Amino acid sequence: MTKKPKLKSNERGFSRGLLHVIVSVLILRATVIEAYNVPTGSMENTVKVGDFILGNKFVYGIRTPDWVGIPWTNIGFSIPFTRTPGFAEPKSGDVVIFRYPNDRWPANIIGPLDPSLNYIKRCIAGPNQTLEIKRKQVFVDGIEMPLPRYGKLNYAQLFSADYQESAIFPRGLGNRDYFGPLQIPARGDTLWFDKSSLDLCHNVISLEGHEVFSTRDRSLVIDGKLANYYVCGENFYFMMGDNRDNSHDSRFWGLVPESNIIGEALMIYLSWDQTERNIFKRFLTLRPSRMFSLVD
């Protein structure tokens, strides 16, 4: 008779402790650190398919969830979100985790994507910076940005400087190997439609949540009203994969607005070969040499 109350007390203490742990983990996941899987090879060999990344959500400002639904499916719905002030802004060279900016601009050839997924690329240029690519080499404000330590490119597959790639963004700025120059818009910039690329203007305006379409006289109709200029409400970023010849990135689908930034990639905590379909055999394909290495 005397042992039962003590047993119940221990059970309640264990339950409270477990609840505290769960709540703490959820708070940590929502505010500071979250795990991400790498689904494509566009960042090889900096990060590979099958790498699991820990990302810092705190450094750029905590972004509350904007989509609620069933993970790994398109079943769900968008919700309003907000962002707290951060300690830094993405800069050239950062490996950034972000929401795919699907704005449905005219040249966009990407199909429907899972809104529950995040993407990882390297930030190449940010607001007010000018990007140019010459013979696969990246230049930001005229200064060469070296290929990252584990980056990949192949000079045997080099497009000519005068080739205009049809899928490039914005149209008319060359190809994946000879691109630009392109100045990245910043908050407060005025885009005059008669002087700017309409693809760029359409991309920026759409990503800021407006309905927009073009007219024949280089004007745009924004939310049903004819306009000949637009003032940017956000900072924008140009993202590229380190596997420069095999990366679908801002050269093809456009810019990433500040509101889509999730965090900075920190560390690979798990890595295995995902081509092995058997989940039990997959543990035999672990890549210990990649585990607990920093992303740089």
Image: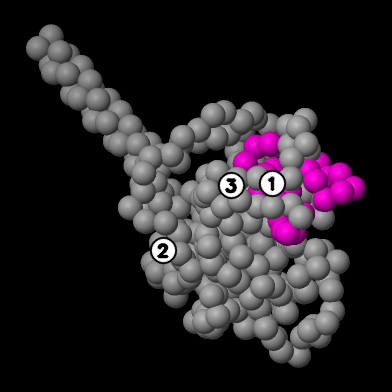
Badge 2 amino acid: Met
Q: Nearer the viewer, residue 90 or 271?
A: 90
Instruction: State the extent of the magenta-drawn residues as a range.
Output: 195-220
| Viewport quadrant of the C terminus | bottom left
Closer to the eye: label 2 or 1: 1
What coloring was used for the rendering?
Answer: one colour
Left or right, 254 with respect to 292, comes to right
Mark 1 nearby-residue class (10 Å; few <14, some 14–19, many ≥20): some
Q: Element type at marker 3?
A: loop
| Amino acid type at mark 3 | Cys
Q: Which mark is residue 87?
A: none
Q: Which mark is residue 232?
A: 3
Quarter assignment of residue 272: bottom right
What is the CA distance from the residue labelled 3 to the residue labelled 2?
34 Å
Expressed as whole percent of the image width and height from the top left, the position of residue 256 reads 60, 53
Q: Residue at x 48, y 68 (%)?
A: 92
Give left or right: position of 145 versus 110: left
Residue at 84% across, 79% down: 163
Residue beneath disc 1: 229
Q: Is residue 18 magenta?
A: no
Question: Can you identify the residue that label 2 sits on?
Answer: 267
Q: Residues within 10 Å of mark 2 (few under 14, many from 20)?
A: many
Which amino acid, by three-letter code, is at mark 1?
Answer: Tyr
Point 77% across, 49% down: residue = 105
**What is the residue that sits farthest to the bottom in this orientation?**
156
The answer to whether the residue labelled 3 contacts the one labelled 1, judged by CB atoms less than 8 Å apart, is: no
- Seen at 65% across and 52% down, the residue is 191
Residue 208 at least partly seen: yes
Name the residue nearer the viewer: 215 or 257: 215
